[in-house]
Structures are given as structure tokens and as C-alpha cells.
Image (tube, coloured by chain):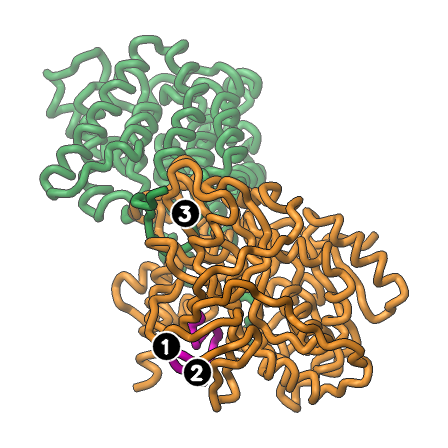
Chain colours: A green, B orange
């Protein structure tokens, strides 16, 4: 038999089923429960968010690669994931222009200008969201006449569950049970912590993420909230903590790689979430906290490198 | 029963050993021509002792070197030397080789009998190993007589027989443990005596319980020898992992097993030492597992050194399907071949043929910093940072991240979602670091 097809590559010649694109597909599967819950709750408004964000993220990535004259990376699925995460961060009825700007910042500035996938220090979706959140004042005035749907952009518009934390009146907010399964308020992903937990469990089961970062964040928020006199359980069920802990802070690129680094990363984020929520402005607390955590990652990776096998501890 | 021994890190590939684990060892046909490289080991290459036209007998010495770290080469067939020439070996290097045309009929090896193994001294055992050209048969091919001459200030108390065989697909050591149990024990005793150790531990993965039972039943009256069950995990059989799993001792970076009082020898090497001592047989034959989805009848064959791999695949019914990878060695650390012309050497444990539907060859992509390589690394290195440093030519940083401690098991690349060939970068880094240190 002819051996014309032999391929010579360095070892190993076996590999796991792991691929970046497979992992991204798993993230999309894991986001399905919360996305469906959002669609049920906000119907076409949620669909509108998702369509705008996913389409603009994919478009901007395609365009950026085109301008940089690089091979398209659309098929790795990361732009779709960024788009969907971004859509889930926004409230319903937000002006469409805000979402396009957030997508532009996420993909073009945070990701592609940093060198593309693998090089971005910050979580693209969160950075894009935080940018719009901070800049929404002038954006709203600037785009007022272009509003597609009614309503401006305001993370705390209406009574989101977070206002009760700031006010120290968690007992008057929604019940734990409704926070877990169906409480509407804030971002379209805030439709029940359970749906996010379900997706997070799937990601851990599929070994896309490890439990270390989400568990550290949730535990830190839970304990510290009680210490500062807030309600720990309420704090981890309300707002974006659950989505942040399982889907944002675990982003491969912008999180530490060693277990010890991941624990400290989770602690930093958890502490920031509680402090910002209780003493600062609750809207975007999780986004800011994770972005702050992202800043520490290069340092954590360098300082907390694993000790080589057989290496004696430095005295 | 004692607990299952293991180490931290590592991976769980599909083992696929059932393809050949039930196949008894049979003799491969003697090829009409053998190509015997004069360097099959780590150390100095041998000088040829024969020239074109010379008549040679199987077992006759045809190459040797003055250097201590080297191993003599013997003819694997009776026949006539066709020529001594440079031939491309399985790694792609050009190596001086003796090409021998084999006689029509090959007589069986005339075993010497009646040798009293008990009376051999440690010095005699080392000399036997050297004269027989013994090298580590697990793959690294380090000369055995050097390994069993530990430094005076580093006494060895434990001999570990490596029966782990953690490379997927390979079953030659498994078959040897089953079919040559007594010879293995005798070989292990010789090793123990050679280094004046007080005990022998045989480590075997839990997927070979028949071999574990066979050895245990024969060792019930041997208080100094034990068999330990090890977790089925790659690379359980790597020297440092094996020593740690069995004794709890950690060989420090850059050091040899003798640093922690251990000697590790592969099952095949122990049996070859027995054959050399008891029968006077030099190392010119070994067991090779020929397997994989691209081979019609996977088998374990007793093969003359120098046999071309094409002849072995033919002996196993030929190729089947669409072969895209022809690997010499195991699939995790072996060498992919461009054709089937390379020949079997002392360290060749297997020939694995992968087909287009069973092998995943992807293009290298950007690192996404998932950290899976760090989790998998049994040496607790950071393969991604070694790669990053190597890509930038920062060799000092590559060393800082542990490039020199890497033994190239390939766990990192196995897990990598971005198809990064870490081992290739590490090899490059090692060569560059070595070159810098020479200056």
C-alpha cells in the first residue's frame, strides 16, 4: 500500500478532544439556560440585545482582521461568545447605539488592538460594557434623537435588587427564591441565578473552567458581605455576581493560570464587589471588580509560578 | 492490599492496549537485509569492526567505542556485510551503519548453560552488561553498565523495575512480564546485586493485573522484592514520577535517581541482562509492539535489531485504512516517519500506525492562556511560558520557566486547545541554552 499521506510532526501524536472552538461552543451551550430565561422574560427586547451585540462583535472582528491583513478567527467562536455575554450584561430597552459602541470597544480596542485572542489583558465584554456604563451620560445626550426603542441607559433604572444592598434593606428586596429562579430587574441576564449556576456546572463538568475562581469569588462575597453588615446570600444571588463568577472571571485569557493565582484573583474580585456595592455605586460593581482583578493577572502569573518537581523551597 | 501508587499531574489518554495485549510474542521473520546503526544509544558512537565482504555471525561484535558512556553493537544475523555507510535513522539523523545481507537459514542462538548466576560479583555483572551492549530498552537507550555504576558517595538502596508501560498502544513489556516472569525476576536480582541494593520494587499499572498476579505469586518467598499497583495515568513510567510514586522520594532538578538512592530499569532491560548473564547472549534482538488502527493484525514480535519497519508491518498483515502517521516508539514521545525505511534499534519499543480518522493534526493557534498545560505538567513547569520565551528568543527566560527540567512527555500538547507543539519549542530552547552555556 502506498504511504503517500504520511505526516511528520513533533510528538505527541495523540491529543485530547480539547480545542478552543469546542470550548467556545461549550460556553454557548452553558449560556443557553440564562439566555432562554432572558428571552422568556424580556421577549423581543432580549433578542434585540443578542442580535445587535453578536452581529456587531462578529462584524468588528472580521473587519479588524481584514484591516490587519490577518487570517480570520471568526471560527474559533470567541467573538460570538463575547457578543452574547455583552448582550446579557445590558438591560432591556437600551439604545442600540450603546451596544454597538460596547462591541466596538470590546473587540477592536480591547481584543484586536492588543494582538487578538490570547493577548487581551481585560475581559473584552466587561470592558466594553464598563466603557458604555461610564460614558452613557454623554452618549445618551449625543444619541438622544437616534433612540431605536424608548428609554436611556441606566444600570439602576427601576428598582434593581442591588439598590436594596446599597440601602442596607435587603429584607425588603426580592426573596431568595425569586432571585434564584425569576426576578427581573437590571441586566437581561438577571432573571434567576439558578440558570447561570446550571451553565456554570456544565462548564466545570466539561472541564472548560475549574471551580476555583467561581467558588472563591462567591465565598468571598458571601462571607465579607456579612462582615460588613450586609446579607451574604442576597449578595451572591442578586445582580451580576453569578454571571461574573462563572462566565467572566473564568475567561481563560484574562485570568491567572495557577491555582494559587486563581484563589487570590477570586479574593480580589470578591472583596471589590462587596466594597463597591456597599460603599460605592452598585451598578457595574461586578464588572469593575473583575476588570480590577484582570490588572493583577500578569503579576500573579509571574510571582505565583508553580514550584518545579523536586525543587526545594527557597529559605 | 496496599494503596494504588501515583504522582500529581499527568493525563488520561485512550490506551488502546487491547489491540495487542492478548497477543503472545512471536518471532518476526528474519529480513533478507538488516541495517544496524553504529549509534543506538546515548553516548559515543561506535567504530565499525567489520568491512564490506566480511562474514559475520549473529551475536558477533561489529562496532565498539573507547568511551565509557557507549555500548558495543552486535550483528543480529548471520550473513555477509554488504557495506558500511551513512543511513538516515528513525530520528532523521545520518548515522554510520552496517548493512548486512542475511543468510537463507538462521540458526537459533546457542545458549550457554549451567552458569551459576548466584556467584557473579557486582563487578562481573557490570562487565557482562557492557560486553552484551545493554542499553535502557524503554526508549532512552542509556548504556546500562553506566547506569549500574552509581557514584561511590551515592549508595543505591532501591532497584525499581519499570513495568508501568504508560505509553498508549504499547504492550511489549506487558507480554514480557507474563511470558518471561522467571527471567525477569532473575534479571532484577542481578541488578540488585550490581548496585548492592537492599530491595527491588516492581511498579506496574493497574491495567495489567494478570502480570501483577503472575509476579506476585512467584515473589511470595522473596522478602526483598515486591510488586506495586500503580494508577493508570501517563507518564506514570517516567523515571522521576515512578520513583516518587513508589518511594515518596523526589529527584531534585538536574539530578539523577542515584541522588535519592534509586536505580530504575525497564522490564526489557532486566530480561536482557538475564539473557546476557545466563546464556551469554548479547543484545541483538528485542520485543516490538506493532500496532495501531493502521495495522491489519497488531502483534508483539521478537525482532532482530536492524529490521526495517516495512518488513515488520508486512509481518503483521500490512497497512489498513489510510495511514497518515507512522510512529517509531509510543504515540506520546515517538518519532513520526516520512516512510517505512528506518530500522529497529535497541530502544524501539513500538511501531504505531495511525489512520486519518484516528489522528487529529491541527494547525498551531494562539495560546489562550487556559492553563491546562500547567495542570497537566508532571514536573510542575509552565509550558506556555517556556513556549512564549522560546518564540521571542529569550532563552534565559525559557530556562527560568524550567525548560531544562522538561523530559518531553508531551502532556502539555496533549491538553492544549490551541494545538501548540510545546515539546518542539522546549527542544529548541534546550539546544539554545546549551549553546549559550558553552560560550
Rendered position, A140 above or below B346: above
Query: Could you tell me residue B48's position as x and y percent?
Result: 42, 83
Marked residue chain, label 2: B
Element type where label 1 sits in the image: strand
| Residue B162 belongs to the span the image colors magenta | no
Front residue of B414/B370: it is: B414
Rendered position, B338 above or below A214: below
Residue at 49%, 53% in the rendered image:
B312
Residue at 51%, 29% in the rendered image:
A202
Residue at 34%, 69% in the rendered image:
B87
Front residue of B289/A263: it is: B289
Q: Which residue is mark 2?
A: B50
| Residue B45 belongs to the span the image colors magenta | yes
Within 10 Å of disc 3 (Cα), the crowding (few <14, some 14-19, many 20+) is many
Magenta-highlighted residues: B36-53
Whether labels 2 and 3 share one chain: yes
- Where residue B241 sits, quadrant-wise, is bottom right
Whether labels 1 and 2 share one chain: yes
Within 10 Å of disc 1 (Cα), the crowding (few <14, some 14-19, many 20+) is some
Q: Which residue is mark 1?
A: B84
Element type where label 2 sits in the image: loop
Query: Could you tell me residue B300's position as x and y percent?
Result: 59, 52
Q: CA distance from mark 2 to mark 3?
A: 49 Å
Element type where label 3 sits in the image: loop
What is the tally of numbered marks visible in this picture? 3
- Where residue A130 sits, quadrant-wise, is top left
Q: Is residue B303 left or right of residue B326?
A: right
Q: CA distance from mark 1 to mark 2?
A: 8 Å
Amino acid at each position: 500500500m502506498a504511504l503517500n499521506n504520511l505526516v511528520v510532526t513533533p510528538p505527541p501524536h495523540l491529543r485530547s478532544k480539547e480545542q478552543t472552538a469546542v470550548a467556545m461552543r461549550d460556553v454557548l451551550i452553558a449560556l443557553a439556560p440564562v439566555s432562554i430565561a432572558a428571552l422568556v422574560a424580556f421577549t423581543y427586547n432580549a433578542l434585540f440585545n443578542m442580535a445587535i451585540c453578536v452581529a456587531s462583535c462578529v462584524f468588528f472582528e472580521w473587519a479588524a482582521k481584514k484591516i490587519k491583513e490577518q487570517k480570520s478567527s471568526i471560527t474559533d467562536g470567541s467573538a460570538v461568545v463575547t457578543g452574547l455575554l455583552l448582550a446579557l450584561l445590558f438591560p432591556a430597552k437600551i439604545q442600540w447605539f450603546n451596544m454597538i459602541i460596547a462591541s466596538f470597544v470590546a473587540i477592536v480596542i480591547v481584543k484586536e488592538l492588543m494582538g487578538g485572542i490570547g493577548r487581551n489583558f481585560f475581559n473584552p465584554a466587561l470592558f466594553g460594557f464598563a466603557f458604555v456604563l461610564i460614558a452613557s451620560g454623554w452618549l445618551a445626550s449625543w444619541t438622544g434623537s437616534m433612540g431605536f426603542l424608548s428609554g436611556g441607559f441606566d444600570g439602576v433604572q427601576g428598582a434593581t435588587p442591588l439598590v436594596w444592598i446599597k440601602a442596607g434593606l435587603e429584607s425588603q428586596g426580592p426573596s431568595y427564591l425569586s432571585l434564584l429562579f425569576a426576578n427581573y430587574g437590571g441586566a437581561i441576564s438577571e432573571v434567576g441565578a439558578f440558570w447561570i449556576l446550571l451553565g456554570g456546572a456544565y462548564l466545570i463538568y466539561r472541564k472548560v473552567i475549574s471551580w476555583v475562581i467561581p467558588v472563591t469569588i462567591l465565598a468571598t462575597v458571601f462571607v465579607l458581605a456579612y462582615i460588613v453588615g450586609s446579607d451574604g446570600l442576597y449578595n451572591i444571588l442578586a445582580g451580576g455576581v453569578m454571571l461574573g463568577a462563572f462566565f467572566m472571571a473564568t475567561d481563560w485569557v484574562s485570568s491567572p493560570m495557577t491555582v494559587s493565582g486563581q484563589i487570590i484573583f477570586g479574593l480580589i474580585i470578591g472583596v471589590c464587589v462587596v466594597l463597591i456595592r456597599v460603599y460605592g455605586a452598585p451598578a457595574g460593581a461586578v464588572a469593575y471588580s473583575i476588570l480590577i482583578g484582570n490588572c493583577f493577572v500578569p503579576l500573579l502569573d509571574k510571582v505565583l509560578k508553580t514550584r518545579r518537581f523536586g525543587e526545594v523551597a527557597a529559605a | 492490599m496496599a494503596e494504588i501508587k501515583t504522582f500529581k499531574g499527568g493525563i488520561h489518554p485512550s490506551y488502546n492496549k487491547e489491540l495487542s495485549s492478548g497477543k503472545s510474542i512471536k518471532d518476526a521473520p528474519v529480513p533478507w537485509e538488516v541495517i544496524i546503526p553504529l549509534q543506538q544509544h546515548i553516548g559515543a558512537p561506535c567504530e565499525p569492526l567489520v568491512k564490506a565482504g566480511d562474514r559475520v555471525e549473529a551475536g558477533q561484535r561489529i562496532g565498539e567505542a573507547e568511551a565509557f558512556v557507549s555500548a558495543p553493537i552486535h550483528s543480529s544475523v548471520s550473513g555477509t556485510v554488504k557495506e558500511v555507510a551513512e543511513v538516515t535513522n528513525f530520528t532523521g539523523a545520518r548515522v554510520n551503519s552496517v548493512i548486512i545481507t542475511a543468510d537463507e537459514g538462521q540458526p537459533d542462538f546457542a545458549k550457554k548453560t549451567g552458569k551459576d548466576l548466584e556467584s557473579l560479583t557486582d563487578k562481573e555483572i557490570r562487565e557482562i552488561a557492557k560486553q552484551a551492549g545493554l542499553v535502557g530498552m524503554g526508549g532512552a537507550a542509556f548504556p546500562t553498565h553506566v547506569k549500574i555504576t552509581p557514584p561511590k558517595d551515592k549508595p543505591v538502596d532501591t532497584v525499581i523495575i519499570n513495568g508501568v508501560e504508560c505509553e498508549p498502544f504499547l504492550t511489549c513489556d506487558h507480554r514480557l512480564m507474563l511470558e518471561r516472569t522467571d527471567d525477569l525476576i532473575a534479571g532484577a536480582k542481578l541488578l540488585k546485586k550490581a548496585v548492592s541494593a537492599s530491595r527491588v520494587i516492581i511498579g506496574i499499572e493497574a491495567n495489567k493485573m494478570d502480570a501483577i498476579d503472575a509476579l506476585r505469586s512467584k515473589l511470595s518467598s522473596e522478602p526483598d522484592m515486591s510488586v506495586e499497583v500503580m494508577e493508570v495515568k501517563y507518564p506514570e513510567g517516567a523515571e522521576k514520577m515512578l520513583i516518587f510514586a513508589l518511594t515518596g522520594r523526589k529527584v531534585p532538578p538536574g539530578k539523577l535517581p542515584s541522588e535519592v538512592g534509586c536505580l530504575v530499569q525497564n522490564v526489557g532491560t532486566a530480561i536482557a541482562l538475564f539473557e546476557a548473564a545466563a546464556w551469554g547472549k548479547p543484545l541483538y534482538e528485542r520485543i516490538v509492539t506493532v500496532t495501531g488502527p493502521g495495522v491489519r493484525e497488531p502483534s508483539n514480535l521478537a525482532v532482530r535489531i536492524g529490521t526495517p519497519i516495512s518488513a515488520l508491518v508486512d509481518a503483521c498483515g500490512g497497512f489498513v485504512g489510510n495511514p497518515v502517521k507512522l510512529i517509531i516508539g509510543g504515540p506520546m514521545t515517538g518519532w513520526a516517519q516520512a516512510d517505512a525505511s528506518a530500522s529497529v534499534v535497541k530502544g524501539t519499543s513500538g511501531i504505531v500506525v495511525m489512520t486519518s480518522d484516528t489522528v487529529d493534526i491541527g494547525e498551531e493557534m494562539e495560546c489562550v492562556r487556559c492553563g491546562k498545560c500547567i495542570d497537566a505538567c508532571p514536573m510542575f513547569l509552565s509550558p506556555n511560558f517556556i513556549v512564549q520565551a522560546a518564540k521571542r528568543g529569550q532563552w534565559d527566560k525559557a530556562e527560568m520557566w524550567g525548560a531544562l527540567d522538561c523530559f518531553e512527555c508531551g502532556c502539555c500538547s496533549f491538553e492544549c486547545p490551541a494545538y501548540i507543539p510545546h515539546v518542539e519549542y522546549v527542544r529548541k530552547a534546550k539546544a539554545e541554552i546549551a549553546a549559550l552555556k558553552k560560550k
